[in-house]
Image (tube, coloured by chain):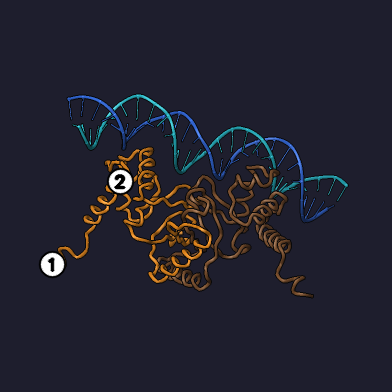
Chain colours: A brown, B orange, C blue, D cyan
DNA sequence: ACGGAAATGAGAACTATTCTTGATATCAAA
DNA sequence: TTTGATATCAAGAATAGTTCTCATTTCCGT
C-alpha cells in the first residue's frame, strides 16, 4: 500500500464517515436518517462554508423549505449541525464541530458572508483556560465558545 | 481635595461623560440627542448588562416600542450602542465598547441571559494578533471581534 | 415667532421561522 | 406479508420580532 493510495481519508470517505456519525446521533434520539436529512448534510458538506436556508434549498431543489427548516432543527438538536445567528436576515448553518473540527469565523458585515478560520492551538488553549476560569467564578457551566471576527470581506 | 471627594469618576460623572460622547457622535451624523434617546442610554447604563427590547421598555414606560427600536438603530449606527444577536427570541443591546470598554459575554443557552466578562489583557492581545494575521491572509478588513462563552448560567 | 428638517408614536406591514394538518413512509413484531 | 404504531413529509397557515408608514409634534437656526 503506497502513501498515494490512502494518504488521508478522501472526500468520499470523509462524507461516509460524517453520515455514519450523524446516523448514530439521530438513532440515539429515536430519529431516522432520512433522505431529506442526508441531502441537507450533503449540501453543507459539499459547500464547505456556512449557508443560509435560501442557499441550501437553492443548492438542492428537492428540499422543501418547511422540511428543510424542520430537519435542520432536528440535526441541530442532535448536535450534527450548528446554527450561526449573525443578526443578518438569515441564520447560517454548518456541520457541527465534532464533524468539522473546532474553528471560528470571519463575518462580513456588508454582505453577510461567513468564512471558516482556524486559530493556533496554543492561542486556542489560552482562550479556553481563561474562559473556563472566568466561568467557574460565576457558577457558569461552559458548553462551547465562539470567536468571530467582524469586518469587510475582500469583495466588499 | 481629598481622595474621597474625587477618587475616580462617580456613576454620575460617568453617565454625564457617556451622554457627552454620544451627543457628539449623533451630532456628527446630523442627528439630535433627544430625550427618548437619552432615556435609552440611561436605561442601558443603569442596567450594566445587555438588555432585550422588552426589558428596556419595561424599565422605562415612557418609551414607545416603535420609537425605541428606531432610536436603538440610530444609536447602533452612530456607534453608541451595540446590538447582540444570539439566535434567541430577542436581540440584546448594550452600550458600545468605546463607552463600556472591550469585553466579552457569557450567554446562557437556556434562559438567554447575557453577562459581561473581561479577559486578561495578554490573552486579549494574543487573540487580536492571531485574528489580524489570519484576516490579512484573506484580504479581510477587521472591525472588531466577539468572543462568547455559551453554556448554562448559575440559575439554569 | 417662523419655516423646515428631524423625531415621535400608534398601528400596519413585513418576513424569517415555526406550527398545523392530513397524507405517506418506515420499522418491528406476529 | 400484514398490521399497527410511529416518524416523516410537504404545503400552506400562523407566529412574532422587527421595520415601516404617516400624520402629528418637537426642535433648531434665522
Secondary structure under tag 1 reads loop
In the picture of the structure, the residue carrying the numbered disc 1 is B2
In the picture of the structure, the residue carrying the numbered disc 2 is B28
Separation (CA) of disc 2 from disc 1: 38 Å
Q: Nearer the viewer, residue A148 or A145?
A: A148
In the image, taking residue B94 as reference, residue D15 lies left or right, namely right
Instruction: Identify the image quadrant of residue A139.
Output: bottom left
Residue A43 appears in the figure: yes
In the image, taking residue A101 as reference, residue B95 lies left or right, namely left
For the N terminus of chain A, the image quarter is bottom right
Above or below A5: residue B28? above
Q: Nearer the viewer, residue A91 or B128?
A: B128
Instruction: Identify the image quadrant of residue D9.
Output: top right
Q: Give x and y (percent) for residue C26.
A: 77, 51
Q: Give x and y (percent) for residue A12.
A: 73, 61
Above or below B36: residue D6? below
Residue B151 appears in the figure: no
Amino acid at each position: 500500500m503506497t502513501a498515494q493510495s490512502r494518504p488521508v481519508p478522501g472526500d468520499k470517505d470523509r462524507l461516509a464517515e460524517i453520515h455514519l456519525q450523524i446516523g448514530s446521533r439521530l438513532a440515539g434520539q429515536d430519529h431516522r436518517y432520512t433522505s431529506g436529512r442526508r441531502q441537507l448534510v450533503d449540501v453543507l458538506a459539499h459547500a464547505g462554508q456556512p449557508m443560509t436556508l435560501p442557499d441550501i434549498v437553492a443548492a438542492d431543489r428537492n428540499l422543501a423549505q418547511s422540511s428543510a427548516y424542520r430537519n435542520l432543527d432536528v440535526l441541530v438538536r442532535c448536535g450534527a449541525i450548528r446554527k450561526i445567528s449573525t443578526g443578518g436576515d438569515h441564520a447560517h448553518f454548518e456541520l457541527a464541530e465534532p464533524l468539522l473540527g473546532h474553528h471560528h469565523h470571519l463575518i462580513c458585515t456588508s454582505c453577510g458572508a461567513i468564512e471558516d478560520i482556524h486559530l493556533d492551538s496554543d492561542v486556542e488553549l489560552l482562550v479556553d483556560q481563561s474562559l473556563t476560569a472566568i466561568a467557574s467564578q460565576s457558577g457558569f457551566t461552559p458548553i462551547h465558545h465562539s470567536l468571530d471576527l467582524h469586518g469587510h470581506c475582500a469583495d466588499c
